[in-house]
Amino acid sequence: MTAQAAQQNTTLAFDHVVAEIAVALQPFKKGEVAITATTDIAQDLNMDSLAVMDLLMELEDKFDVSIPLNMVPEIATVGQLAQTVIESKRGA
Amino acid sequence: MGLMDRFKAQRELHAAVKTCGADPFGVKMDQILSATEALIEGRPTILCGSNNYLGFTFDADCIEAAKQTLDECGTGTTGSRIANGSYHDHKALEQDLADFYGKQHCMVFTTGYQANLGAISTLAGPNDFLIIDADSHASIYDACKLGSATVIRFKHNDPADLDRRLGRLANEPGNKIVVVEGIYSMLGDHAPLKEFVAVSKKHNAYILVDEAHSMGVMGATGQGVVEHDGVLDQVDFITGTFSKSMGAIGGFLVSNMEDFDLLRVACRPYMFTASLPPATVASVRKSLAKLRANPGLMAKLWANVDTLYDGVEAAGFSVGKQKGPVVAVHINDPALAARAWHALLQNGVYVNLALPPATPSGTALLRCSVSAAHSTEQLQHVVAILARIGRELGILGTPAHAVAAE
């Protein structure tokens, strides 16, 4: 696989994961603003810390990965969360 | 940004709940009358939201033991367990607890919170994994933050979910420690320990059980859910507290782990705080001795559980699924729950108010708890008041049903 193709694959995976996370986040939307990679989980959505932990659990099952609670402080945006999922999958 | 600006959410929540007419988080007991009664705002009030499961706070023998030790040993140790704070009774209580659980080793901590904080944060190292129940007590979550292990959360009381999450860690070399509680403090349900132990063994994981709310409550001799489920010998670590059924304060860890005593010089919440006052230790030794001499004390507690749980359920309230000394009345609307809580207080009944997001159910809870020291009449009175307030506030939607139940 060329470097370009690998890059392409990662990009696709990233968009796919963001889309899946956006689906899981529908119940927490504030108004009708679309959820994208730059959506800030704490500020742009109606989520408390418990809801964030429950979301991680849901994503662990959806992607069959382990996402430790230790990651929570480092995840601000949907894009960062997607990246965490992708890295967890690679590590698995 | 000011130091306190971060607490905007707490400020708003607290302000909202106070509109019920009182501050549920600022109740002052003006005078304690007994294990089950206090004066609040001048009213004699039935305490139905304590954790005084065996009523030992006012046991004459426990008080006498504490008084005598107070005279002999003074008011406090002024030092840590590893310095000048280990007296004869601290060591004797550790031996008592090791005997009670049939384990080789015991450490006594200054609070139950510190027992979990210390045990969990110290046992799991940087390359290890803590796999904790989603509804774990704050002391378990805080232990995870204090420690350096990787933390994974599994669905509450769900052994199949634990199995799946441990399975994902199969190729990780670190040790795994599963952390569960016996009885859960908010909803009063208890862990399926037999299943949790089987899943933990399957994955070569250690298992720690916090029996804070189940010691002196479950099992033939009061060891807790480990005894109720017949898995005491398969559980690696048990933590617990003296501030519930033992009627005082303090915490413990028991285990058969080799080299256990190394924890005494590695566990910071054990090393860097003053030890329990000797009078407290003496009263706990007496409480434990009384429980061991007379496990029948628990029969009175469970008879009282029947009165409250069955009464509240028959009145038409939605209660926690498993019957036990914690009877959680679910009320969907937090504002309504706060009004009901205040009305109860004004009618001489104290229960705990728990609000989302701090509740595992997502609903507000009127958390009632039962003591062996309650009289049947007290608990019948609580049920009657609850039912009346439930009807008046429209929480009980079917008056005919509720009236019949009362």
Image (spheres, coloured by chain):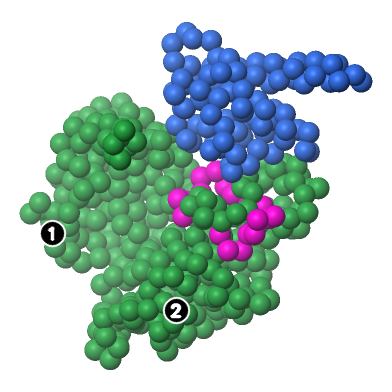
Q: The blue chain is which one?
A: A
Q: How crowded is mark 2: few (under 14 residues within 10 Å), some or many (20 or more)?
A: many
- The percent coordinates of residue B245 (x first, y second) are 39, 66
Quarter of the figure with the N terminus of chain A: top right
Q: Nearer the viewer, residue B226 or B312?
A: B226
Residue lying at 60% horizontally and 18% vertically, measured from the top left: A37
Name the quadrant containing residue A69. top right
- The percent coordinates of residue B62 (x first, y second) are 31, 79
Chain B appears what colour? Answer: green
Going by the image, does B385 lie left or right of B260? left
Going by the image, does B56 lie left or right of B207? left
**Is B390 contained in the magenta span?**
no
Q: Is mark 1 on a helix, strand or loop?
A: loop
Residue lying at 53% horizontally and 38% vertically, measured from the top left: A73
Which callout, 1 or 2, points at the residue further toward the start of the chain? 1
Does the rendering let one see residue B167? yes
Per the rendering, the mark at residue B371 is: none
The subunit carrying tag 2 is B
Which span is picked out in magenta?
B121-140
**Amino acid at circle 2:** Arg
Q: How many marks are shown on the rendered structure?
A: 2
**Amino acid at circle 1:** Asp
**Is B129 contained in the magenta span?**
yes
Per the rendering, the mark at residue B81 is: 2
- Residue matched to label 1: B30
